[in-house]
Amino acid sequence: IWMFDDKWLEVTGYVAFPLMADSSDELLSMLNQWDGCCIGIPPTPYDAIEVRLTKAVEGNARMATFGTVRGRFKIDPHLVGGWLVGLYAMDQATMSPQTYGGFAP
């Protein structure tokens, strides 16, 4: 996977935004669906990308559950108390929503 470090990539998958925010400039792009609470299973550090968007997403785009993110991919281990909680990051990203309401195409 190191060959992708610091490269510009496009990834399509499930997305989740922080809860309780009117707009957000960050999201999780994930292999499996998860809504932060009750639908699906929480992602492991190996199947989620922490995405930082260049522009905050507002309105209906925040309701997207599946979409494409494009940005600069980084391998950046995030440790908390010696535990790996995140491994992949993407910055300078844009997001194109593809599905709303919990269903993937």
Image: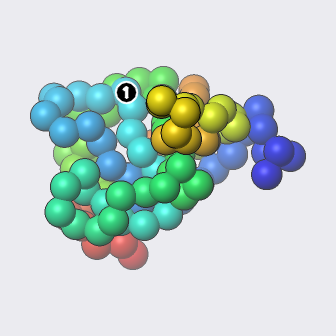
Give residue 65's position: percent from left, percent from top. 31, 58
Residue 20, picture quadrant: top left
Residue lying at 49% horizontally and 63% vertically, measured from the top left: 31
| Furthest residue toward right | 3
9 in relation to 57, above or below: below
Crowdedness near tag 1: few (<14), some (14–19) or many (≥20) residues, C-alpha within 10 Å: some
| In this rendering, position of residue 98 left or right of residue 82 | left
Give residue 51's position: percent from left, percent from top. 49, 36
- The three-letter code of the residue at mark 1 reads Asp
Whether residue 66 is visible here, answered yes or no, is: no
Residue 60, picture quadrant: top left
| In this rendering, position of residue 7 left or right of residue 22 | right
Residue lying at 48% horizontally and 24% vertically, measured from the top left: 54
Whether residue 54 is visible here, answered yes or no, is: yes
Residue lying at 48% horizontally and 30% vertically, measured from the top left: 80
Secondary structure of the residue carrying numbered label 1: strand
Give residue 66's position: percent from left, percent from top. 38, 60
Residue 25, picture quadrant: top left
Query: In the rendered image, which quarter contains the C terminus?
Result: bottom left
23 in relation to 18, above or below: above
Residue holding disc 1: 25
